[in-house]
Image (cartoon, rainbow, N blue to C red):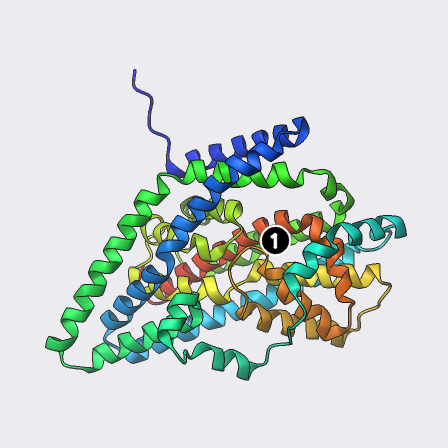
Amino acid sequence: MKLPKLQLHTRILLGLLSGVIFGLLANRLAFSGFLLTYVKPLGAAFIKLISMVVVPLVFASLLVGTASLNDIRKLGRIGSKTLAYYLCTTAVAVTIGLFLANTLKPGVGLSRELRTELIQNGAEQANAKIGTTFKKPTMTDLLLNIVPANPIRAFVEGKMLQIIFFALLTGICLTLIRPDRSRPVISFFEGLNDLMIRMVHIIMKLAPYGVFALISAVVAEFGAGILLALLKYSIVVIAGLMLHVIIVYSSAIRIFSKQKIAAFFRGIRPAQLIAFSSASSSATLPVTMECTEKNLGVSAKICSFALPLGATINMDGTALYQGVSTVFLAQIYGMDLSIAQQLAIVLTATLASVGTAGTPGAGIITLAIVLKSIGVPLEGIAIIMGAERLLDMCRSVVNVTGDASCAVVVASTENEM
């Protein structure tokens, strides 16, 4: 009797669970060094394979999608809806984080000894991530950073906002020149887009093994001990992330689309699992595009615009985490944040999330910006570094889910499902 072939998300989930078990055993039986030396590189190779196709896939799909619209007004309408959705859900995410942190008070009651131990354990890692130079972003900075002075450099450095801007401008200009001149260019990028999608299909066959390597290395390296010290803080962050997904995204899909909520979460599951394992919404982008188009029925035009933009500027999970973390650290240092300061957190976290790279640990850098804006000591970042990796994985799932929900909502309002 031939056994039925398991679906991709089931195989990825099995890889995830077996990786957790193997990582716990490695941490407990003290052979984590072997795992980090020989297994972790396999996970890193898988992430590099996915990251390899991100830039050409985003540029080709966005250019083709823009050129095929043949209507600049429709592009402006889609863009305004997408930006409005991302900014509104990000502001709501920060507000949820602040509400939970103020209500549950995770930073109250932490002993001085434990706080000192956490600072000592995380200081070096925190300093390596946040560096010494950062500033609160302004709207002018954000707008200027969108325009590439050198498109080739933007491609080399993977600056997604600049790549998106250049792809949109190129696609628009292709609609404005003679069809006999534009058609060969569009055909070339259609072929490149198909090539990248086929490459994603091949890479995804390795996903269960890549997920196993990634998650087992994380569990073996960090274990579960440090989380106990930060248990209340971690629970508040994860609870906020779950509430945001269940309430905000589900409500948006129910109100603005005919997509069934259960079908949405089932369709996006492979991307969520990859995001959890890699802690990177940018690396997950090709998988998110594949799931959203094939499983959820969103048109390629909407996917090629909303999802690359979302992987760059939509950081709801990161923004919520920043809200909770800021109040948590303020509570530890005995600071009472005023309403004005908490409103400043909402504004700063929303703006900072627009410029956050969708890579592991990038949320720490923007957290430093938020803390500095209201005067919370930056040294406090070291306190939460022990739980950073797990929370980074969880908030990446939320970021990816938000990208897909936006694509569904915008496609539904544009009759592009």
Question: Where, quadrant-wise, is the C terminus in this rendering?
Answer: bottom left
Which of the pair 129/355 is nearer the observer?
Answer: 129
Q: Position of residue 405 (x, y in %)?
A: 45, 58
Q: Position of residue 312 (x, y in %)?
A: 47, 65
The residue most toward the top is 1
Q: Position of residue 350 (x, y in %)?
A: 59, 70
Above or below: residue 357 compared with residue 294: below
Residue at (80% x, 56% y) in the render: 105
Residue at (49% x, 58% y) in the render: 402
Disc 1 residue type (three-letter): Leu
Q: Is residue 34 left or right of residue 271?
A: right
The residue most toward the left is 180
Which of the pair 190/106 is nearer the observer?
Answer: 190
Residue 145 visible in rendering: yes
In which quadrant of the rendered view does residue 196 lie?
bottom left
Residue at (28% x, 67% y) in the render: 65
Q: Which residue is mark 1?
A: 241
Question: Where, quadrant-wise, is the N terminus in this rendering?
Answer: top left
Q: Residues within 10 Å of mark 1 (few under 14, many from 20)?
A: many
Above or below: residue 347 compared with residue 324: below
Q: Position of residue 213 (x, y in %)?
A: 50, 37
Residue at (56% x, 51% y) in the render: 246
Q: Is residue 159 left or right of residue 36?
A: left
Give the total number of marks visible in the rendering: 1
Q: Is residue 196 left or right of residue 114?
A: left
Residue 260 visible in rendering: no
Q: Is residue 244 left or right of residue 64?
A: right
Which of the pair 162/62 is nearer the observer?
Answer: 162
- Mark 1 element type: helix
Above or below: residue 54 compared with residue 232: below
